Image (cartoon, rainbow, N blue to C red):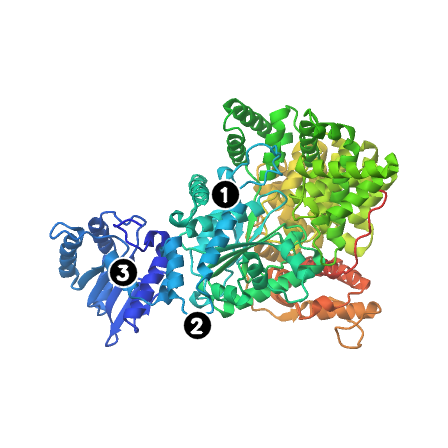
């Protein structure tokens, strides 16, 4: 810290925390002072000291990011800008006006800034009729020096990492729950984290194991995300920047004026960078915490490089220091399952990670006293059978943190597929990673190329030029949507000019490129790869399929790794069947497993004696290859039962695209199977799982390669135009950063005149018939009308026509629907509707068949009447209000609260849902009139909930080679 700024770095602390610090100092000096909320319109008074019932002393805080700027002109101008407020305050009785500033004053008599400002303030005092003075930086420093240590602990962000730890340690005493050794242990833990997380995980980018590793900071980029506010509105943000900005606030519950989500849920698809962002944020906090003055030379170099890299990437180093902890949730789930106690909490797990004999009580005390950042990474990788137990422990940890008034920021990460709101919306704000724009993809590719080829400018230029060319081609542009895909494409363009056109071909080309690179080497490894390729290919398929299947049915043990001994035994049995030489087979097993894990980089050993995939997307690809490797007669039957299992979603899509690419004779059979998914019964008619999968397959852009089948997929996906909830499918926030259903269909229409004509005709026929389906159809047509594209002219004409012919009930339903679900977008000729919220209230149970009287729930359900009672009991917890729209009562369910479990009764997870419960929900949903659109959506959610609570396991996969 420089002599000009002193020991306390208020610039690092930030504007709002500095004001809170000043308020705390004022309260310490004047217990009766009134402090106003930070960030509010305060009328020129951050704090007021009243005397005789009048605001006698006014305190106004002025912070600057530049401590040595000319304070005389700046503060004098600030006083002039407050003229109106000062005159009002003087008229109300103010006798003194005090400025508290982070600026540094100079003390030279007569010419120093402190004396010069005194002259200016004397002039202002005479002008306004109130005494004026300043608390300079030195004044605030002196008050802080004599302030209680507890106050300094609350604002550790104003200290460097070293000084903060020193201050914390100095404040501890023998009676403190936190041992004196604790700060140094925690600093050592942060150092270990810096060294562990400093490398990019290049297993996913295909770097040669012998080549120099690439630092995480060198290729660091902050990714764009959609920020969902509690009101449902969506804004854009940079993910790392937003997390760090949130962390600049003091998040102790006692400091919060109102209960609002203070933690962050980071949602992102495969390879979108969730884990990497978590690592980057933790590294930023470690850089802020650690001081190079007390580090070893190699650690000092790493921290210094990280600081420069983060600055270059535009990722700020936090001002408010937090101790960063990153937990991989599937590892915690594994530890929880293997623990002798079923209450193995996060504090115990963290204490075990820290080591050095640290006790749970010490970590508990550290949580109480020191600001934390806790990253909970990869909820989607936790087995469904133990996910509830894991989240119970997360909830227990959050409760503990609130009880000790902890300054805690939690960042959870997961994929959207299969996510059911486990991170409660009352605690977590949703931050959804968006697909990379072309410019962002090229920027990341450039950083990666510079890092990989820093000593070969020609190779770097070649990679960037070829990636740029791929970004201009519509068929390859779609494969640059995530950092993982950009990394793989960057590797591929180093060796080849022809690029893949879909995700399956992308991963297949990646695997083939890595394999060919190692096989071409004149070594024993190269010989093994050439001679035993089919066994090594089998090994990857076997591990991928086994781990994917285990993830779906596992009961508590870690699904992301398998015992290396198990793999060795299976490979040995396979080799023995061919060689009939046990000794030779054993030797080959050792060599082939070593080649697969050490040279091909897809398989790794996460822990000694285990084998797994470093990147889940590669596991899913290998599982997809396995599904396509069996006899032709088994491929489609194997895919059918896995189609609706969220655990298999990405692997299933990869397999489907691979089927189109490598098994053309099975395409028609596959599409028939896909259609059949929607006709199994009434629940499927409402949920349309096959249509949703058809829509997902359109995203892999099969148009140019398979136009006839592309048209059939469009026709199938077009059924979603009239389905409830498709504009926010899976009951997540409105924007996932992925194209909406309407946008995907519009994209498909742009590729095919036949597809465009079919979509226009479907929408027209639906709007003509009116009714419930027409209400939902309007959401899609409104989206088409709002965006330039081939469907826009027809969509606008359809809206004009629909508005003119609407019946009274249809009109009322549509006006409310537009207000609630279309975020105010209006249809031609229909005025906006504002929610009244004061109509008659009932529950969702009113819209279901009345069940027969029987024993109270919860209880075993043995017949259809029992199923009806169960559904009715669930629905009785869900309030419904009526909105009177143009004289017609339209029921409305609070969909957002429903989806976040706000109305679910305790113990509902233990209810035994009868299969007829699905039918009852579906029948009631499909029977609703146009005005019942909100009821249908709520019942559709009920169907998803029943599927979630269904304990049956997916069938096993047969016939895979």
Whether residue 466 is visible here, answered yes or no, is yes
Image position of 8 (left or right of 946): left
Image position of 711 (left or right of 311): right
- Going from N to C along the chain, the mark reached first, 3 or 2, is 3
Foreground: disc 3 or disc 2: 2
Marks 3 and 2 sit apart, C-alpha to C-alpha, by 30 Å
Quarter of the rendering occupied by the C terminus: top right
- Going from N to C along the chain, the mark reached first, 1 or 2, is 2
Q: Residues within 10 Å of mark 1 (few under 14, many from 20)?
A: many
Image position of 812 (left or right of 586): left
- Residue matched to label 2: 175
Whether residue 888 is visible here, answered yes or no, is no
- Vertical relation: 95 (above or below) 123: below
- Residue matched to label 3: 140
Nearer to us in this view, 395 or 161: 161
Res 959 → quadrant: top right
Tag 1's secondary structure? loop
Tag 3's secondary structure? helix
Tag 2's secondary structure? loop
Name the spot of residue 600 as percent of width and height, x first.
68, 35
Foreground: disc 1 or disc 2: 2
Q: Are marks 1 and 3 in contact (CB under 8 Å)?
A: no
């Amino acid at each position: 810290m420089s002599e000009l700024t002193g020991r306390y770095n208020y610039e690092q602390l930030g504007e709002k925390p500095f004001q809170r610090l000043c308020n705390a100092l004022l309260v310490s000096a004047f217990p009766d002072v009134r402090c106003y909320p930070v960030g509010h319109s305060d009328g020129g008074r951050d704090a007021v000291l009243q005397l005789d019932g009048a605001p006698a002393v006014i305190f106004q805080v002025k912070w600057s990011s530049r401590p040595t700027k000319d304070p005389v002109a700046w503060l004098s101008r600030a006083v002039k800008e407050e003229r109106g407020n000062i005159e009002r305050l003087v008229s109300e009785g103010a006798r003194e006006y005090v400025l508290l500033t982070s600026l540094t004053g100079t003390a030279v008599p007569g010419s120093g800034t402190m004396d010069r400002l005194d002259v200016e303030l004397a002039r202002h005092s005479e002008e306004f009729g109130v005494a004026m003075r300043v608390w300079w930086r030195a004044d605030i420093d002196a008050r802080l020096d004599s302030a209680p240590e507890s106050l300094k602990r609350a604002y550790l962000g104003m200290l460097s990492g070293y000084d903060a730890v020193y201050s914390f340690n100095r404040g501890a005493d023998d009676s403190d729950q936190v041992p004196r050794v604790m700060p140094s242990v925690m600093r050592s833990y942060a150092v270990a984290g810096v060294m562990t997380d400093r490398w990019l995980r290049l297993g996913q980018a295909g770097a040669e194991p012998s080549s120099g590793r690439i630092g995480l900071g060198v290729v660091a980029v902050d990714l764009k995300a959609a920020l969902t506010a509690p009101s449902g509105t969506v804004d854009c943000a940079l993910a790392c920047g937003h997390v760090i900005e949130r962390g600049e606030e003091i998040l102790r519950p006692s400091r919060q004026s109102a209960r609002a989500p203070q933690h962050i849920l980071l949602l992102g698809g495969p390879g979108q960078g969730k884990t990497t962002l978590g690592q980057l944020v933790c590294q930023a906090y470690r850089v802020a915490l650690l001081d190079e003055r007390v580090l070893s030379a190699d650690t000092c170099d790493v921290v210094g490089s990280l600081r420069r890299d983060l600055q270059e990437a535009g990722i700020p180093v936090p001002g408010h220091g937090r101790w960063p902890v990153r937990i991989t949730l599937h590892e915690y789930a594994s530890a929880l399952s293997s623990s002798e106690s079923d209450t193995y909490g996060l504090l115990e797990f963290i204490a075990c990670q820290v080591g050095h004999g640290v006790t749970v009580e010490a970590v508990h005390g550290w949580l109480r006293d020191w600001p934390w950042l806790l990253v909970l990474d990869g909820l989607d990788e936790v087995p469904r059978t133990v996910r509830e137990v894991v989240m119970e422990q997360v909830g227990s940890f959050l409760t503990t943190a609130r009880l000790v008034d902890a300054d805690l920021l939690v960042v959870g990460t997961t994929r959207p597929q299969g996510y059911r709101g486990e991170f409660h919306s009352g605690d977590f704000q949703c931050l959804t990673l968006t697909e990379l724009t072309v410019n962002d993809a090229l920027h990341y590719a450039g950083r990666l190329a510079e890092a990989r080829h820093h000593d070969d400018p020609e190779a770097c230029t070649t990679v960037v030029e070829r990636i740029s060319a791929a970004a201009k081609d519509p068929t390859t542009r779609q494969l640059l949507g995530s950092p993982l895909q950009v990394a793989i494409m960057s590797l591929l363009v180093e060796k080849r000019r022809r690029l893949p056109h879909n995700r399956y071909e992308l991963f297949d080309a990646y695997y083939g490129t890595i394999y060919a690179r190692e096989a071409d080497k004149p070594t024993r490894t190269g010989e093994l790869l050439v001679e035993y390729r089919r066994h090594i290919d089998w090994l990857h398929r076997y591990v991928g399929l086994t781990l994917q299947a285990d993830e779906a049915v596992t009961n508590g043990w870690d699904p992301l790794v398998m015992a290396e001994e198990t793999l060795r035994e299976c490979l040995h049995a396979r080799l023995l069947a061919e060689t009939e030489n046990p000794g030779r087979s054993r030797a080959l097993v050792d060599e082939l497993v070593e080649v697969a894990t050490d040279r091909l980089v897809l398989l790794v050993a996460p822990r000694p004696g285990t084998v797994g995939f470093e990147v889940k997307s590669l596991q899913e690809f290998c599982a997809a290859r396995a599904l396509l490797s069996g006899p032709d007669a088994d491929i489609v039957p194997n895919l059918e039962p896995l189609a609706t299992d969220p655990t298999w979603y990405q692997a299933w899509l990869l397999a489907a695209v691979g089927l189109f690419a490598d098994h053309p004779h099975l395409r028609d059979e596959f599409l028939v199977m896909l259609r059949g998914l929607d006709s199994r019964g009434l629940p499927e008619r409402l949920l349309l799982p096959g249509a949703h999968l058809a829509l997902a397959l359109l995203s892999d852009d099969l148009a140019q390669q398979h136009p006839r089948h592309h048209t059939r997929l469009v026709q199938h996906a077009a059924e979603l135009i009239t389905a409830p909830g498709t504009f926010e499918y899976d009951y997540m926030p409105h924007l996932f950063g992925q194209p909406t259903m309407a946008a995907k269909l519009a994209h498909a229409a742009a590729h095919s005149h036949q597809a465009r004509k079919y979509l226009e005709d479907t929408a027209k026929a639906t709007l003509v018939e009116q009714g419930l389906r027409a209400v939902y159809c309007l959401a899609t047509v409104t989206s088409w009308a709002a965006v330039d594209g081939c469907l826009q002219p027809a969509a606008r004409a359809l809206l004009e026509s629909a508005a003119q012919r609407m019946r009274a009930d249809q009109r009322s339903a549509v006006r409310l629907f537009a207000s609630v679900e279309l975020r105010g977008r209006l249809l031609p000729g229909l005025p906006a509707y504002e929610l009244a919220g004061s109509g008659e209230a009932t529950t969702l149970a009113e819209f279901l068949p009345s069940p027969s009287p029987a024993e109270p729930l919860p209880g075993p359900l043995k017949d259809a009447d029992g199923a009806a009672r169960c559904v009715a009991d669930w629905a009785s917890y869900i309030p419904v209000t009526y909105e009177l729209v143009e004289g017609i009562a339209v029921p409305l369910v609070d969909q957002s609260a429903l989806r976040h479990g706000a109305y679910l009764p305790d113990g509902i997870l233990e209810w035994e849902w009868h299969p007829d419960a699905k039918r009852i929900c579906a029948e009631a949903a499909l029977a609703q009139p146009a005005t019942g659109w909100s009821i249908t959506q709520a019942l559709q959610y009920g169907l998803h909930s029943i599927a979630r609570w269904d304990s049956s396991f997916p069938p096993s996969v047969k016939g895979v080679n």
